[in-house]
Amino acid sequence: MKLLSTQLFRPRVIKTSLIALCCAGVISCSSSPTTSSLQRDGSAYISQGQAQARSSLVSNVQYELTFFLSEHSQFSAKSIAHFDLSSVPKLLTLDLNKVNIKQFFINGIKVYPNYNGAYITLNQSLLTEGSNTIEVEFTREHSTNGEGLHRFVDPVDGKVYLYSHFEPAAAQQMFAVFDQPDLKASYQINVHAPKDWQVISAMRETNVVDQGDSNLWTFPATPKLSPYNFSMHAGPYHVWEDNSGRYPMRLFSRQSVANQVTPQDWFTYTKQGLDFFDRYFGIAYPFKKYDQVLVPDFLYGAMENAGAITFSEDRFLFNAKMTGEQKERLAGVIMHEMAHQWFGDLVTMKWWNGLWLNESFASFMGTLATSEATEFSHAWRTFYASGKQAAYHQDSLVTTHPIEVPVATSQNAFDNIDAITYQKGASTIKQLRHLLGEETFRHGVSQYLQQYSYQNAELDDFINSLAKASGRDLRQWTQEWLYAAGVNTIKAQYTCQDKQIDSFALVQTADNSQHPTLREQRVQIGLFTQNRYGLEKQQSIAVTYKGAYTEVESLIGEDCPDLVYPNYQDWGFVKVELDSSSFSTAKQSLGQVSDPLLRSMLWQSMWDSVIDGKTSLDQFINIALINAPLEKDYTILGQVLGNLQRAKNYLDLMAPMHGSYNSRISKALSQMSLRMSMESYRNRDFQRRWFDAYISLSSHGDALKHIQSLLQSKSHIKGLNIDQDIRWAMIRQLNRYDYGDAKALLAQEKHLDQSDSGEKAAIAAEVIRPQSSLKRQWLNTIENNDNMPFSKIRIAMNNLYPAEQKLFSAATADQRFANLALMDDKGPVFMRSFAAQLIPTDCSSVNIDAISYALDTQTGLSQLARRALLETRQQEQRCIKIKQTLK
């Protein structure tokens, strides 16, 4: 991160003294050498060792914060930090990022700050053993990249909205702080804000005083929180209130989008979740009130700020009544963030290597609460079809990593935040619950939360609580599951004689020779017989297996099955390879499997066989063309259509080798989707799912002509309401293929919809146009424009090079490889998006060589960037393998 020189700051005149010279580093304050464990590198990041050394000295931290907010691009603040020192260190820093310091005091003495733009080095001679107070007055520019105190100007009405986001270590962008999770503190804030603004924080305000042009909001001190769990949001937010539950609830949004919010859904799921978690944990919700704030330009889906959770508008605002999928996603994210209020906020990790446990546990508990406390009882099936598959994919890559990994510095906190952290971790916790028993697991979790309330804890503390509750030694389990990388595969191996099983075993293998660990877990084995009505379950038994080979003698003598599924009901985290007989049965009987979870798993087996190069892509597409229209389960339909879209993307990448086949399949897929859109008029959710697929799968003239006709109201589909979100999706697709009046339709829609979501949708539709000069212009904007909000840069990245625009991508591939280091210097927030979207892909050996060359020559790239290159190279290798199997 670029640091500001102290010369950029213009503090008020401070009397020169020995103290000032000492603090400025002009003269030596001490003959003692600097303590190496506390020595920092001048950046805003802190290492784990430095954080541990600092927390061993500092305790009893309390912050008094006063903010002066307005509609302008800057804010000013007075930040007071009270803390105790066990001894006076030779070096101690206080984090404060890119501010203009006006006044600075150490224990009441006004001095010139020794400040490098990232942190203040405190003068040893002015610190004392015991209590200390640091006071800083400063101004700072608001951020526009989603971190710190983010500022957003509503393009509809010009109103200004602020919200904070501090994870992993961005509280220092808003006040002077020991910005590390194991220095928990209380926060007492006062906020001067415009008259028509709301101010939201972890606590409910105690007083709002009219001060003429502004109001002064006063808040009581919070319980002890890690800096990243604290928050403050302000602006002319619209507010809804609901006091019908145990805890007062509020919901906030920008005024211009308030009509897109359905507060009753939010309050219903929130009440259901609070009741569920109170009962499950046996600990009352710790933060007294429950506020939820919809915010623009958000980097993530949501953030678990204590008592004041933020949610991304992009994911939770819609221009029409929510579909079932959208409602389920809303309920799931509310539950996920709510679980964090206990597991993450009440009890917090000591360092960022524990972030996985926060997220894994919240993912597990969020899904459990959604399935048991809301109408979405099928939530675990949704988890299997989406998140769990992402985890299997991530865990099969060359960059797979253990769930628990070291984190060197706060800069690396998110390097390994991925589907292994979230969904594999959640799956691991789920199967541990099966292994220990549901009530034993719940009891262990409750003990852990009670013992470490308002404190920091480590993985061993959590595991020891479960071990104590279960009376079981979990050290081997912990080693296999949390410290060993990679995913395993199981396969049923059996023989039959006289139509009865005479031998049966589970064979476990490791997918990656570099990660050979074979694990113990408990699964169910399901046996099924095919009859004229479909597949009938004949038997299911629970088995704990471990090692390479586990005999299952209890199945000997059972009728010989037509299909065996060795992870029935999805207890375990393990990939399933169907035996040849079961695979053949699955292909023939997909539409006749009545159990929706089993059907989902069999669909996944079909797709996995394509990815593994064992079944050709065209075979999967043929199976889907026959069976997808028969699918009556909404969740499974989404899973199948998602895999069809991935299949279409592979075909686009393989062009022109399979251009003729691609053209035929594109027509078949769009025609199927249109037909099912028309036939599903009685079911709004199904119709919307099929129509979304129709838009995204359409690439040939007839379909695009029809989409343009629908957009211009020259054609209609019975029951379909073409809302603003659908309109933009249609315009984007027309511009993707530069069909008909696409460019004029984009300009017209851009004029009609000048909302924030409209601006972003217009960028997507413009960027995706197949136009060489436009592509280069936008790539230059992405690489060099530091003024455009990151949320819009990210939209441009996501749409610049769709799969079929290989020639346009190839034209700038060398430039993107050459500029990787420059993009890396923009920091992890920027690089994550750039790496995911703009590392060149071509489904060719030439591109694989180019990636390898970048890895060999650009040795200074961050771990995050190198990881992205490695994963892209592996995906290119997979694409070539799939291309070779295509008939």
Image (cartoon, rainbow, N blue to C red):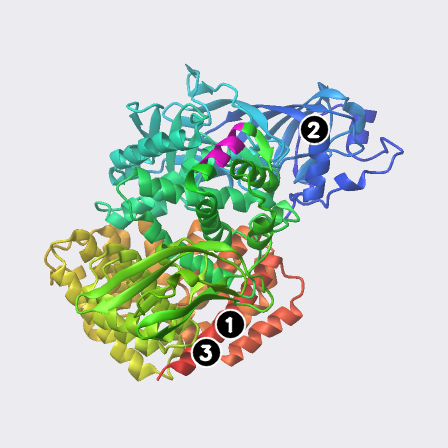
Instruction: Identify the image quadrant of the C terminus.
Output: bottom left
Secondary structure, mark 1, is: helix
Point out the tag, 1 or 3, that comes first from the N-terminus: 1
User: Is the residue marked by circle 3 packed among few (<14), some (14-19), or many (20+) residues within 10 Å?
Assistant: some
- Magenta segment boundaries in residue numbering: 442-450
- Residue hosting label 3: 880
Point out the tag, 1 or 2, that comes first from the N-terminus: 2
* Relative side of 805 to 467, left or right: left
Residue 430 in picture, x, y percent from top left = 44, 47
For this rendering, which residue is in front, 71 or 699?
699
Q: Amino acid at mark 3?
A: Ile
For this rendering, which residue is in front, 760 or 526?
526
Residue 354 in picture, x, y percent from top left = 58, 43
Decide if residue 648 is in sight here.
no
**Which residue lies at the image location 36% right of the left edge and 78% below the top edge?**
616
**Which residue lies at the image location 29% right of the left edge and 49% below the top edge?**
378
- Residue hosting label 1: 813
Q: Amino acid at mark 2?
A: Val
Residue 525 vertical placement versus 460 (above, below): below
Q: Amino acid at mark 1?
A: Ala
What is the C-alpha distance between the residues marked 1 and 3?
19 Å
What is the C-alpha distance between the residues marked 2 and 3?
55 Å
User: Is the residue marked by circle 2 packed among few (<14), some (14-19), or many (20+) residues within 10 Å?
Assistant: many
- Residue hosting label 2: 58
